[in-house]
Structure formats: structure tokens, C-alpha cells
Amino acid sequence: MPDNSGSEDLFTAIGLRRAAPKKGFPTQEMIPQVAYEVIHDELMLDGVSRMNLATFCTTWVDDQSRRLMAESLDKNIVDKDEYPQTAELEKRCVRMVADLWNAPDAATTLGTSTTGSSEAAMLGGLAAKFRWRQRGGTGTPNFVCGPVQVCWEKFARYFDVEIRQIPLRRDRLTMHPDDIAAHCDENTIMVVPTFGQTFTGLFEDVTGISKALDDLQAATGLDIPIHVDAASGGFLAPFCAPDIVWDFRLPRVKSINASGHKTGLAPLGAGWAIWREASDLPAELIFNVDYLGGSMATFNLNFSRPGSQTITQYYDFIRLGRIGYTRVQSEIYRVAKHLAKGLVHLGIFEMLHDGDPAKGITAVSWRMSGPQSFNLYDLSDRLRTRGWLIAAYPLPADRGDETIMRAVLRHGFSVDMADLLIADVVRCVAQLEKHPMGLTKEEAGGFTHTATAAVPTT
């Protein structure tokens, strides 16, 4: 039976006079207001998303976006016959993204919305694996990359592909063109440059990597394609660094993935996978669904999923256009540079990425410039007391003894907020100089977009 204590005060209702259900499936009902309050109050323990500078994902959307999301909650994007206009908006977005990334013929390019860049990356990888098989590939396929987000490690394991991750030798923070040839062979299905590396925010040199693969083909005959992981950079460089050639202007680039819910400004749950030409997406990966008496191709790892994120992404595209995206993204870069300048002014940090749009995404990453009485894990922990979530973590393979911090700046992060953060860094540093802690990575916590497999690869 519904809770009904006879009182007009919500907090005297029966459902709030006992702990929330936590184990077995609950027997009793709750009135909606009580159930809402239970969950609402528990969620106050979460961090404030806009102060989470560890995440790449959208944490601010306008009221119109929220309205469109609410109005589209019941639209299943795979049901293209029942929701044909949602399907049409998805098709328009695909053409717009293909045009943004300079596809040879954006009107006929194949692409799809996804739940995020991880699903989109796996679709790009699967297409590369199937193309390799069509060319007569046998044995265990492999792909070559630098420091990558965990989705690529998942792709390698889930789809039985060897990942050849190039270590960060000497002072290198990204995969370099001269690293490529030694890791490629006849079973290499693709090379994956990261255009907006997770650890530091830096762009990898896609043009240089393409040239290195051209040279490799000339010397050995190996014709190895590129898939660009542009999870964050794909909606930044076209507006703020258009002279960087990283996309389909390079013939060797066959597919690109990006997150709509990162720098694309869409709410969580939006991603894009785009292929250079229709022939780059093997037909074996395509399924057809009924659509207004005909059929429409679909190629996703998911089937049923909400259409609201794609609808809202289309809203972002038509509301802002190229001019608006350039204005918004340029402002985020300006704030990033302001933050970097303020941190450098403290005299104890060395910048790895200072928010330069020609070098990387809207992020700032740094390390200690010399020995201090405290470490970056201590600083990360102290900043949490003021609500800031900024992870400290070690660099990838062969530079794992170096610890850095990275702050990702997003739409909604202002100069005033940057000044508040700098003031809190100054306050925390002063405290730590008096009372150093010596925390480890495990003790400090913090989400670093990495994960450890439960069963290690042998």
C-alpha cells in the first residue's frame, strides 16, 4: 500500500522513517514524492559535476536541450518506422559531421550515432578487422596505437585483436611517426592515432603518421589504414585549429570516432562513427530495419537505445553552426590558457599542455617542476575538500614513475571559476607545505579513465 501517514510534512511519511531499500527487491510501495526525496537526498553525496575537471563529458546544457531530452525520453532510435523524423535527424547529423571532417562526399558517407565514442571506436575497429579479412588476412590481427583510453584495450580483448601499444620512450608523451614501422606487419588492421590523448590532452600527429605509413607501403607494400580516435578533438580542431590536417583530407584515414557528449556539447549518451567512403564499411556489419515501408541500414553494438541525445545533438548543430561552435570552443581555450598561466605563476608546476588549440584539446596538464615536500596525489586529495575533482595519475608504459595532473575544461567553466580554482590550489599548497601527507595513487583515488582487467592478458 502507498505510504500515507496523514501528515502534510513529507519527512514524517513512513518511507522516510526507515532506511532506503538496499538489498532484496522491496515489498512495499512508496508515494512518488517520498521515493524521489530518498534518491534526491542520497545523490547529494555525489560530487558537483561542473567542478569535476577529471571528466571529458558535458556537464552544462541549456534549458532547450533539457526540454528536448524530456520530450524525447520515449523515442527508441532503432525504431525508425515509428519515429521516422528522429531517424531523419540522425541522418542529417551524420552528413553534418562528415562535412565537418572533410569526407570526399558527405552526402553519401556512411556513419551512425552511438552511445559514445567507445562504441564508435569499436565499430571503427570492427570495420578495419573485416576489411583485413576481405583482403585475405589470416592469423591474429593487430592494431598499433600510443597511450589510449581503456575502450581500445576492451576492443582488443572482446574482439580477439592484439593491441600493440607503443611505449613512451625518452621524453615522448604521444605516439610519434618514427615509432610506427617497427610495430606494423601484414596482420596490422589499422593504426590508431589519438586526436586528443586522454592522459595529457595532446594531439597526436595524424599527418606525420599517415606519411610514415606511406613510406612503409613504398618500402614493403603494406597498405595499412588509419582510424582516428577523435573522441575529444573531433569537435575542437575543425573550429579552433582548422589548419591541422587530421581527418578525411588524408586518404589513408578510413574512419573516425568522436564523442558528441564531450566537445560536441551534447548530453551524455551521444557519439559518432563516420567512414570515409561507403566501401570502407563492410556490408557484413550492416543490418537493415524497416523504415516507412522500406529499410534503413543500422550498424551498432546496441539495438534499442534512446533517441533524445541524437535529437539534442542536432539541436546543438543548428543552434550554433560553425560560427557558434568556434565562438564557444575558443572561449573554453581562452579559459584553459588563463588557468595554465595562473598555475605556472605559482612556480612549482611545469606545463605539459597549456590549452594551446594547435597542440591539444581544452585541457591543462602539469607535473611538479622540482622536488617538493608533497606530491600531486596530496594536492588532488586536498582539492577535493573544496569540491574540485582533479585526478593525479602516473603516465603510461615506460614513464609510469612520473605523476601528472590534468584538468579538462568544458562549456560552462568560466574565468571566474578558474580564478577560484587557482586560489584553492594556492591555499592547498600552503597547507601541504606545512603538513605534507605522502599519499599514494590508491589512497588519493580519482577517476583517470583507465581500468585494469580482472584477468591479465598472458
Image (cartoon, rainbow, N blue to C red):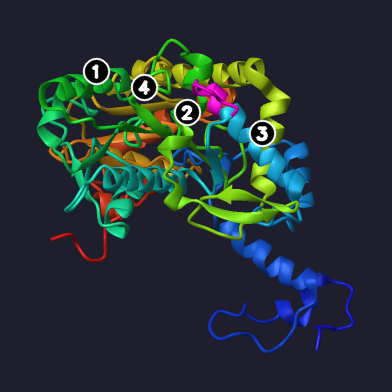
User: What is the distance, in whole Å, between disc 2 and disc 1 at their CAs?
Assistant: 20 Å
Q: Nearer the viewer, residue 51 or 301?
A: 301
Which quadrant is the N terminus positioned in?
A: bottom right
Question: Viewer-nearest of labels 4 and 1?
Answer: 4
Q: Earlier in the sequence, mark 2 or mark 1?
A: 1
Q: Residues within 10 Å of mark 4 (few under 14, many from 20)?
A: few
Residue annotated with mark 4 = 251
Q: Label 4, secondary structure: give it.
A: loop
Q: Label 1, secondary structure: give it.
A: helix
User: What is the distance, in whole Å, between disc 3 and disc 2 at their CAs?
Assistant: 17 Å
User: What is the distance, in whole Å, between disc 4 and disc 1 at their CAs?
Assistant: 11 Å
| Magenta stretch, residue numbers | 98-107
Q: Earlier in the sequence, mark 3 or mark 2?
A: 3
Residue type at mark 2?
Answer: Gly
Circle 2/circle 1 CB separation < 8 Å: no
- Residue reaching furthest to the top: 243
Left or right of 115? Residue 81 is right
User: What is the distance, in whole Å, between disc 3 and disc 4 at their CAs?
Assistant: 24 Å
Q: Residues within 10 Å of mark 2 (few under 14, many from 20)?
A: many
Question: Viewer-nearest of labels 3 and 2?
Answer: 3
User: What is the distance, in whole Å, between disc 4 and disc 2 at their CAs?
Assistant: 17 Å
Residue 67 image-quadrant placement:
top right
Q: Is residue 329 visible?
A: yes
Which quadrant is the C terminus positioned in?
A: bottom left
Residue annotated with mark 3 = 92
User: What is the distance, in whole Å, between disc 3 and disc 1 at their CAs?
Assistant: 32 Å
The numbered disc on residue 211 is: 1
Q: Nearer the viewer, residue 293 or 440?
A: 293
Residue type at mark 3?
Answer: Arg
Q: Residue 26, position in %: x, y?
A: 64, 85
Question: Viewer-nearest of labels 3 and 4?
Answer: 4
